[in-house]
Image (tube, rainbow, N blue to C red):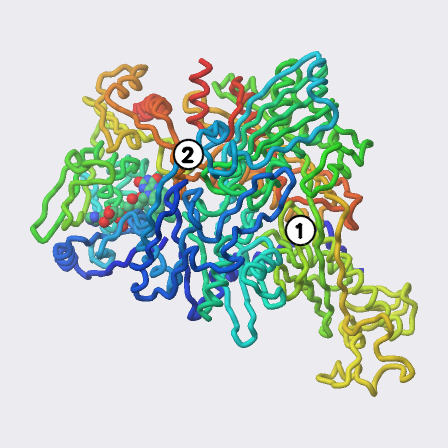
Amino acid sequence: MKPAPFAFVRPRSLEEALEVLGAHPDAKVLAGGQSLVPLLTMRLAAPAMLVDINAVPDLDRISCDDDGVRIGALVRHAALLRDEDAARTQPLLRLALSHVAHPTIRNRGTTVGSIVHADAAAEMPAVLALLGGSVEVASVRGRRTIEAADLFAGPLESTLAHDEIAVSAWFPALRPGERVGFAEIARRHGDYAMCGVAALVGPERTRVAYLSVEEVPTIVDLTGVAPDDVGEAALAHLDPQPDIHATAAYRSQLVRVLTRRVLEQAA
Amino acid sequence: MTTKLFGTKVPRVEDDRLLRGQGRYVGDVFSGQDALHAAVLRSPHAHARILDIDVEPVLDVEGVVAVYTYDDLEDAMGEPLPLLIPHPTLTHGRTQYALAKDEVNYAGEAVAFVVATDRYVAEDAVARIRVRYEPLPAVVGIAASRAAEHLVHDDVPGNVGARMEQHNGDAPAEIAKAPHTLTLDLDVERSACTPLEGRGVAARWDPDQQRLQVWSSTQTATGVRAAVAAKLGLDLRAVDVITPDVGGGFGVKINHPWPEELLVPLAAMRLGRPVSYVEDRREHFVASAHERAQVQHIEVGFDDEGRLLGLDVMFWHDHGAYTPYGLIVPIITSTQLLGPYKPRAYRVVFESIYTNTVIVTPYRGAGRPQGVYAMERTMDAIAAYLGKDRTEVRAVNFIQPDEFPYEHGLVFQDGRPLTYDSGDYPASLEKIKQLVGWDEFPQYRKEMAAQGRRVGIGLACYVEGTGVGPYEGAHVHIETSGKVKVATGLTSQGQGHQTVFAQLVADELGVRFEDVEVVTGDTRRMPYAVGTFASRAAVMSGSAIHLAAKRAKEKALRIAAEALEADVDDLEITDGVVSVKGAPGASISLGTVAVLSNPLRYAFDEASKSATQFAVGDPDKPPVAPGEEPGLEGKDFYSPERSTFASGMHAVIVETDPDTAEITILKYAVVHDCGHLINPMIVEGQIHGGVAQGVGGALYERMVYDENGQLQNASFMDFLMPYVSEVPETIDIDHLETPSPLNPLGIKGAGEAGVIPSAALFASAIEDAEGIEITAMPISPSDLFTLREEHR
Ligand SMILES: Cc1cc2nc3c(=O)[nH]c(=O)nc-3n(C[C@H](O)[C@H](O)[C@H](O)COP(=O)(O)OP(=O)(O)OC[C@H]3O[C@@H](n4cnc5c(N)ncnc54)[C@H](O)[C@@H]3O)c2cc1C
């Protein structure tokens, strides 16, 4: 469990990081390392170079305004979880983050890293998708904003180009009249969930996000569905997959139960 | 008088060092030194013929020092690894080679061995070795093995390594004439020990002295020493095996020699440089050992009270690809299955069968969890059938306190009669009912049901043969400083041996606890020993240490009596000082006694002056009296005629979520009888750890093999060892102390107890909550949900 050889650079500015990344097609960004390092040690990934962005200044900021919460690429899960302004502006962040891994991992792992890592079992990609947030990315070619709806391409696959660094993510604020809910069931406390559900209930629309059910975070619109029918209505849009911890039927059951529970929470 | 430490909660002396990160493990042995590091190329196939191994691409990798394949092994190293415990019924035992010869039989089997300047380079090199395999059909799981459509080993018909039968009375005849009969078919899956420190070995060859030193993360230093000497063609005296701190064993490290335990010393000798190997987590999953998988078929006949008239058990034990540890696990299942009960007639037949999966060797409990599961599921089924309380059916079958020693008419794992030495099962049952609130439970169930909550209660009883032989020894040495150095040969993996053994010595010698230092698992200090397994350390080494301390004390008193001109019977030792009872001032310290015990020609300090030739001794007598030896030491061995049988009962209340099928533990209670408790805190710690491991085995852990023999969850991400958040926050423990008549301390083993009844226990409680028969363990929420769907 030792990684294959790689070169390591630790740029002191975003520009430098982007240049190195642009010049090395087989380089990978290292943020909190909580997903990448295990992949390296198990030799499931063997990039020729790691571009460690931890020394890039100003990426660890959390800023909140009436519109939403913006977090820099180096904001750790733990920092965002603690942040009172963020919790007030968009309560779903704290609700969901408390389910992300364990405290030690939250202390290093970054929320932006989790989003661009695009694990369908991760909480924060589903949250970003549900809220309709976005990610701002930069490369030597310039900057662009990727809407959540366009971000998740497949399992562990986001639409960032190889030479792009996600510099921040933006989560829209909770608007008046809106309520949120979050619930998940994991085999052990802090594990990736077998099924997780986040809900955003507004005066006009009821939207629900599912993690660990399909290969990407999935959003289902349940506007106007009667409370007793929400589970089945959601399943009509979903194709729950089996794995070694849950059969497809069991996962469907969790969809039913958790959909009802989060919508009650958000009622 | 020095207060007696036996029976008190003396804090563990180990903890300060271990908790501060000052433990010294195999991985630390050569730290900071210029040692070489090894990595192993392992078979990616569960079953394949090796056509060709090409190591060429590795030879020019910078930093690679050596690459070995089977062709590089000579003499005994080229023979299969030892079959440690042969048995007449193990007619088709097979063991692997240190490096695969021409066939691999499980994914993970060692194929090539690379030594390099560091582990990184060694792994790079391993990735470059090219092996051409011809894949063969893999036999995975008990059903496939029994079907024997494909064979694991060509020369083992039906994949059956052993078939063994034992009986007492005529069970089929008893069942035939019994008023009631039942049949059960049960399943238990694989799990594993998974200590946090995996296997590891380091070795250094001293060419000047022609001496090999080996450090291994093992449960038997003497076993490894004998194996290394035999395999490498060395005299036993030329090999030292030292066990540093070991980060957990739980059974897996009693198997030996592992291929790496031979290859590392071999490389150290050939290369003339220190070599070390520490396996990684993935390797531990695919290349060490698993346990527990069995399929069981039970037929039972009983009377109206639920009394067992005939019990007829057949089971199939999946032992994986090889049988280095013989039949110990299934023999334990087949004998310990009986627990605290006395069926009128019993027959058990097992087949120990091959699969193309990781080998099976004892894991804490070692076959007992499966036996208890078979027996306790049967008890629950009888109670359900008769509409009786589960505790009543158990009670009518108990061996009674006045029936000890109780002979079962079977042969136990040590080749000796299965004879229980002592116990009080009715008293245990009363205690456990109290502790868990058995009689109040129906009311509680009603209250919970009113809130829409579903709860169940379970109970499981076990008897555990502990302290198996053949022997352990101890050496106690009182130094001239008055400090006491103790050595025993078996090894420690965190149990607290240093603490309890020091308690015994301090009590017996009358010295301060702080002045006793205990060394375990170092063949330089105690070359005769067996190992740490079968809950035997306290019973075996504890007894030996007690006896050795007694000898040292007798000698101390003899010498002191002469020095004080008093009678031995008038002496007592307190805080390391020998004094004449009732004569203040007439005293001599044990340190001085040690000086006197060793008549000197040369003085080296103030104290030793008094032992030199012009200072002491009757000029008319030999300085060392006939029959005496110089030095204040005691050495003794303890070798009991048979095992001592501890027992216990666990009870649990669980809640099952009607919607999500999640299983939550609401209350966990343990009544435990291991005879006299040397240190109740350490016994309780063992129970806590065992219960945690049992919860893992019952509700979380399994080895998920696909049909090709690939382990799907070979990491701590997917192999669900419980976190602290998954084990009960409190475990209510009550002790019963039924002393063993077999050893001087009246003690029984306690190391494995906590894990033994778990599968049976949770099956019982979940069945009670759900009203669905539970026949397969472990059980996950997804499994429970599937069962509910099947029973709708
Ligand atoms: C035991 C354990 C349990 C866990 N449980 C959970 C859980 O329950 N839920 C959950 O959501 N997560 C869980 N995680 C993952 C954790 O949340 C990680 O922090 C997260 O997935 C990745 O963040 P990171 O900063 O560590 O990214 P890294 O590991 O550094 O990188 C991950 C990937 O994203 C890329 N990347 C990272 N940052 C950027 C960036 N700014 N721009 C471009 N690319 C980037 C990297 O190149 C890499 O490919 C767990 C991790 C562990 C070890």
Residue at mark 2: C-beta within 8 A of ligand 1: no
Question: Which is more toward the observer, B417 or B385?
Answer: B417
| Residue B86 screen position, x and y as percent | 62, 45
| Residue B42 screen position, x and y as percent | 40, 49
Q: Point out the residue furthest to the top here.
A: B179
At horizontal 62% and vertical 64% (from top left) the residue drawn is: B236
Tell me the tag on residue A187. Answer: 2
Q: What is the CA distance from the residue labelled 1 to the residue labelled 2?
A: 36 Å
Side of B615 relative to A133 (left or right): right
Side of B664 relative to A243 (left or right): right
- Quadrant of the image for the C terminus of chain B? top left
- Quadrant of the image for the N terminus of chain B? bottom right
Visible residue check, residue A244: yes
Task: Give a yes or no on whether discs 1 and 2 share a subunit.
Answer: no
| Residue B458 screen position, x and y as percent | 59, 26
| Residue B186 screen position, x and y as percent | 55, 25
Tell me the tag on residue A6. Answer: none
Determine which quarter of the picture holds residue B89.
top right
Tell me the tag on residue B537. Answer: 1
- Sort mark 1 into few (<14), some (14-19) or many (20+) by Cα contacts within 10 Å: many
Question: Which is more toward the observer, A233 or B706?
Answer: B706
SS under mark 2: loop
Residue at mark 1: C-beta within 8 A of ligand 1: no
